[in-house]
Amino acid sequence: MTKEGVGYLRISDDREGLERGIERQRADITARAKRERVRIIRWYEDNDRGASRYSRKPRKDYLQMLADVKAGVAGAFIYSYSNSRLTRRNRELEDLLDLHEQTGVQVRTIVSGDDNLSTADGRMVARLKVTMDAAEAERISERVRRQTRERADAGRPHGGRRPYGYPDGRRLDPVEHGVITEVAGRVLNGETLMAVARDLNRRGVATVTGNPWSANVVRQMLTSPRIAGFTGRGGEPVARGAWEPAIGELMWRELRAMLLDPARATPRAGRRSLLVGLALCGECGRPMTSFITHRRHYYVCRGCRLWRAQLAVDRYVEGVMVVFLEHALETEPEDEPRVNAQERKVEQLRRRIAATTAQFTNDDAMTPGQLRELMRSLNAKLAAEEAKLLPPRRRRLQAGLAGPDAAERWELLSLDQKRANIDDLLEIRLLRARSGQRRFDEGTVELRRKG
């Protein structure tokens, strides 16, 4: 009598090619099932998915297989190439043992042997195998992390998928480099990440993976130490890399300070009001929201019901901005000698940190505790010196708009850019208008210069 079962296929190492590895597993499982007169009624595949606790990609087919077995539609056998193909997690094995107890399903493997899950000794052996597989996954993870640290300290690329802008990992592609500098400039000038991503998708600009651009993808690209010419660890620069930087260090630090600021507000998709979230209620201090009635737009405080006509407030605030910019002096250029001296000081500290780490492996007199204390002190000094390199964004933004033709320049800005400039310069509070007042009263818009 022919019995029924299912086959589970998984491979996460693509050195020999995912398709070839999967087909080899399928052939071995099919041959054994045929010898045992078991018909494979369904295959479950999780390609390029790890089974250890370090894997972040979900194994959808594995979970579906367990659900089908529990529902009684997957037969009485689960075939896999090895125990490690099924799982390297103790928690998942316990779920598999519970499934066997509930349904009687048997697990068969090609190279790991078959454990009798209905006996205490069989379950013990299964648990030992998973524990050893988990330990091997941890050893591999430790080796990979150490190699990654060594490559970063030596200024070598970390490997893996190539970063945007670098087809061979080292030299810049002219087209992709142009996209990086364009995106960096637009974001620094006030455009939102989402607006930039939508524009890149509309123009057909491809990412490295071919997937659409998103706000998160743009943020990751602009905050990565890679595009400033550094190797990184945990998102922080470690050493000068052996490749061309796509943007200057000062611009990159300015982008990081802006995009990684915890106080940075992410505008909701579709926001089209100039001062929503920027203007505050003059009575309770809450951010003003927008409200439309009879085709008229208003700023409203949801707490105390204060409301103001949006068009009149926007015109007044924009007028104040233009007047200020028309009379503002353009920012003096950055003190280049000071910047160069500061960059040299930062570079010296980075080299000292790298040398200290290298010296520890050859210095029996220094204990790990002493190394941690020294590195903590050096890293604190490095962070303090790097902070001095950050240029004031507000001055740079205003410098690009200031002058007699500020009104024309202001009108060319996008809504996001206008909001960014207003947010950098003004604190706005809206006050309640007098009862019965029909004309706009400038005194009900309280403006204060920031800084």
Image (spheres, rainbow, N blue to C red):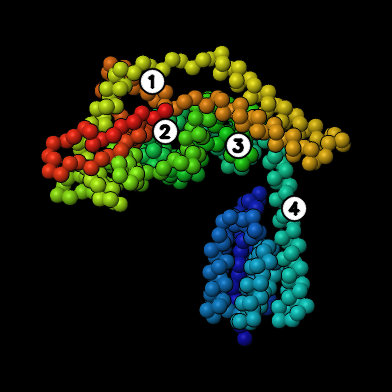
Q: Residue at x 74, y 37 (%)?
A: 373
Report which residue position mark 2 lands on: 187
In the picture, the disc for residue 236 is 3
Report which residue position mark 4 lands on: 139
**Viewer-side label of 3, 1:** 1
Q: Amino acid at mark 3?
A: Glu
**Quarter of the view holding residue 342:** top right
Q: Amino acid at mark 1?
A: Ala
Asked whether the viewer can see residue 149, the reply is: yes
CA distance separating discs 2 and 4 = 42 Å
**Viewer-side label of 3, 4:** 3
Q: Residue at x 15, y 44 (%)?
A: 435
| Above or below for 376 versus 58 | above
**Viewer-side label of 2, 4:** 2
Element at badge 1?
Answer: helix
**Quarter of the view holding residue 202:** top left
| Above or below for 100 versus 341 | below
Report which residue position mark 1 lands on: 399
**Quarter of the C terminus within the rendering:** top left
Residues 164 and 413: in front is 413
**Quarter of the N terminus within the rendering:** bottom right
CA distance separating discs 3 and 1 = 30 Å
